[in-house]
Amino acid sequence: MDVKKFVSLKTVLFLVFIAVVSAGAWYFMSGEKSVMEYRTAAARRADLRSLIQATGTLSAVETVDVGTQISGTIKGIYIDYNSVVKKGQLIAEIDSATQAADVAQAEANLNSAKADLMNSSAVLMNAEKKLARTRELAKRDLIAKADVDSDESSWLSAKAQVEASRAKVSQYRASLSKSKINYSYTKIYSPVDGVVVAKNVEMGQTVAASYQTPSIAEIARDLKQMQVEVNVDEADIGGVKDGQRAFFTVDTHPSKQFEGVVTQVRLSPTTSNNVVTYTVIVKVSNDENMLMPGMTANVSLIMDERSDVVVVPNSAFRFKPVNPNEKTADMGPPGRGKQNVAAVTAPAVYTLDAKNQPVKAEVKKGITDGENTEILSGINEGDKVITGIVVPKEAK
């Protein structure tokens, strides 16, 4: 090999090595001298709502459970699901043979009691006439005093028997009325105008009313007006009042937002898995017939509203410069020393000064919607607040 060529090759390799080391040192030093970057967001004006998020179930404002007060076999059922019914419309009928027999028996008993009354009245009339004759003879001293007493006793007994017969007539008349009422219960009529939302029996089915009233059907009075029964956590219930606005969505119409009004906060709590909730009633109009009973509603209860106020992202309140007393407090480049930035002890955000260093700005907070917070004082519209730090990989 030529010695001159070998020396030239070594020289070239050495120069390349020196260039690589120099480039690495320059890159390392320039990286250390880079200024820390922060994510910022400008305070802006916006409309803000403070909300309580909850879930609930849609139902009709008034649902009537139509039952039967007597036992028997369903002879006819004249409704089905979604049937529109009017008040007084016949919706079901129970076999009335037993009740018809009870009415006939009660009528017979009443007639028998009336006959007994007529007989007792005749006996009383005879006793009155006999007593009158006895008293007339006694005035003439033609009969003994004991005969008068005997006839008076007979008259009183006859009079008592008439009263007893009258009472029995009243008793059997009431029994007949009761039998007729039970007979009328064999025909079941709708108590309201509405829509059938549940049919609980079929023709030929036997219903027994011994211990509880069997349900024939459920009728929703008016599905144009519905309500949402919202389960609100005990931590949030203190801010819910009658008259507050609410809006909600249902899974079947995710792009449609429905509005309602809180009409009732029920004081009876429900405990499930150690979680206490209260039921809040939200009334809603259903003029478009898009809502149905039983749907799950994702409800937002509006606690407070603000229009055209200064807001900042909530992440601005979560940003906190590193404590200067900690070993990792040196947030600036070498040579700058540790940043002496006060820690947040009151509601505050951080802005950047002319040297790109965080400066604390104490603020007065208003309402929040979970993403943004209203600023009542401390910063102005357009001021940029720090929301986070740009890590080296993110820096451009």
Image (cartoon, grey):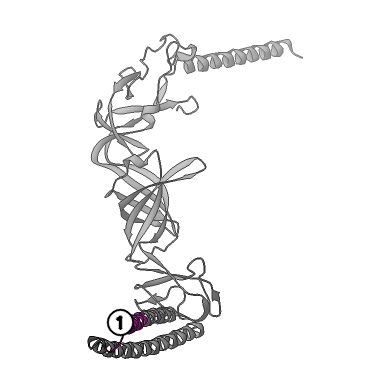
The percent coordinates of residue 281 (x first, y second) are 35, 53
Which quadrant holds the C terminus? top left
Task: Let me know if residue 39 appears in the view.
Answer: no
Q: Is residue 185 magenta?
A: no
- Quarter of the figure with residue 39: top left
Foreground pick, 31 / 165: 165
Q: Is residue 159 magenta?
A: yes
Residue at left 52%, top 42%?
Answer: 273
Specify few, some or many for label 1: CA neighbours under 10 Å numbering under 14, 14-19, or 20 or more.
some
In terms of secondary structure, what is the magenta stretch mainly? Answer: helix
Vertical order, 116 against 290 (above or below): below
List the residue tagged with mark 1. 145
- Quarter of the figure with residue 114: bottom left
Secondary structure at numbered mark 1: helix
First to last magenta residue range = 142-163
Which quadrant holds the N terminus? top right
Vertical order, 44 against 223 (above or below): above
Say left or right for 150 vs 108.
left
Residue at left 25%, top 27%?
Answer: 379
Foreground pick, 304 / 380: 304
The percent coordinates of residue 232 (x first, y second) are 40, 45
Say left or right for 131 vs 92.
left
Foreground pick, 111 / 211: 111
Residue at left 28%, top 49%?
Answer: 242
**Which amino acid does the dot numbered 1 rest on?**
Lys
Vertical order, 162 against 235 (above or below): below
Task: Let me know if residue 284 appears in the view.
Answer: yes
Residue at left 29%, top 22%?
Answer: 362
The percent coordinates of residue 329 (x first, y second) are 45, 14
Foreground pick, 227 / 265: 265
The percent coordinates of residue 183 (x first, y second) are 44, 81
